[in-house]
Structure formats: structure tokens, C-alpha cells
Amino acid sequence: METRILLVDDEEINHIAIVPLLESLNFECKSLYNAIFIKEEIQEFKPDAIILDLHMPGKDGLTTLGELKANDEMCDIPILIVTSMTDKALLNSCLEFGASDYLVKPIDFIDLKIRLKSALLISHMNKRLVKLERKHAVDAMVVSANHHFNQDLTVLKGSLELLVGMNSENLTEKQLKLIQSSLKSVNNISKTLQSMSNIKNVNYKNYIDDTRMIDFDSQ
């Protein structure tokens, strides 16, 4: 899949200048001429990075940058600010708001290439780091669960089987079904713990509302 770049700039001339440069680097590009509906465009296009003009009518780049960095679903997308301003205080404000870098107009092709690829590389490395940290957290949880539950489950299963073996003739049909149901539940818990031990990739699925759970079926 090609790397996707969303270019947000109100001036057509900048799209004419920048888009061919991006396409020459084998990026898939999408042009947006204002930032009013940028969140909807991000949800549809799913860009890997955004090049955002700082001065635009309707909603300026700094406001847009702050909104995107405050959005949990979009805050990790690297954003390069484009501006004709060279005021260091303003450029530093952009970095403080969460911009990955900035480009000063007129844009130099080599500068664009280096800064964009650097931002994409850092983003990729951060995603890998988050994935590894998530995996380590799950591994620790699995070890803890097995440590605390396995022995008790073994004792419970053995006790239920012993109860059936020694008293099968004295147990009613209802009692036998209850014990068998309990044994089935114990076995299901053991299988779940085993599935947790074999997990390779941490994938989530929706549970209730905004709550998610680990998807063991995807392993």
C-alpha cells in the first residue's frame, strides 16, 4: 500500500507545486483546500502524514493542529506545517502544539523529501514501540493470570472429578448436570488462559460502547 499524504492548503498554486513532488516520491496524495472538514477527510482517506498550511481562512493551521493533537484517534498522525513566515517564536509554537516539523515557502524539494521521510520514519518507529509495549503488558498480564489461577483451577477440577467418581450413584441427575457444567466452565477458563499464553499480536475488538477487549479469535 502506498504511503498516503494529505495536503491542506487554500492556495491552488501550492497544490500544483507540491503534489507532483510528492507523487515523484511514490506517495498517494489527496488535496484539501481548507481545514473545516479535515477530520472527516482524515477518517475517509486515512493519511500517514499531513502537510498543513499555517495561514488559511475559516480555520487556521495552528487551530487545526491543536484540534488534531487533542483527538485520540488522530493525534499520532505526523503533521508538517507549511508557512511563508520565518518567525522563530511562531514556528516553535507549532512544534509545541505537536507538529513533527515545518517547511518554509518556497518549498525546496530536497528539504520536503528529508523532513517528510524523517517524520514518517519516526511515526513508524513510535507505532512499533507502542505495539511492543502493548505486547509486553499483555505478556505480564498472562503470566500473572496463569500464576494466580492455574493452581486453583487444577484443584477445583480435581475436586469436582473426585466428587463425581466417589458419589456418582448418590448424586441426582440435576446435581450431576451442575457438576458437569462447572467442569465445562473450568475447562473453558483453562483454554482461555492457554490462548492468552499463545498470543502473538495484540488485536482488539469492540465490547460495550467505547470499551474494547482483546480478540483471542484472531490469533
Image (spheres, rainbow, N blue to C red):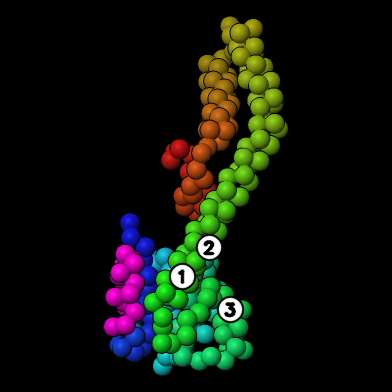
Q: Residue 122 carries which label?
A: 2
Spatial separation of the CA atoms under disc 3 and disc 2: 15 Å
Residue that numbered label 1 is attached to: 114
Q: Residue 95 carries which label?
A: 3
**Considering the image in quadrants, where does the C terminus appear?**
top left
Q: Residue 192, can we see it?
A: no
Q: How crowded is mark 3: few (under 14 residues within 10 Å), some or many (20 or more)?
A: some
Query: Tag 3, which secondary structure?
Result: helix
Amino acid type at circle 1 is: Ile
Q: Residues within 10 Å of mark 1 (few under 14, many from 20)?
A: few
Quadrant in which residue 19 is drawn: bottom left
Instruction: Give how far across and how far down residue 181 sits, in percent.
Output: 53, 25
Amino acid type at circle 3 is: Leu
Instruction: Give how far across and how far down residue 2 sits, in percent.
Output: 33, 60
- Magenta highlight range: 15-31
Quadrant in which residue 18 is drawn: bottom left
Viewer-closest of 113 and 56: 113
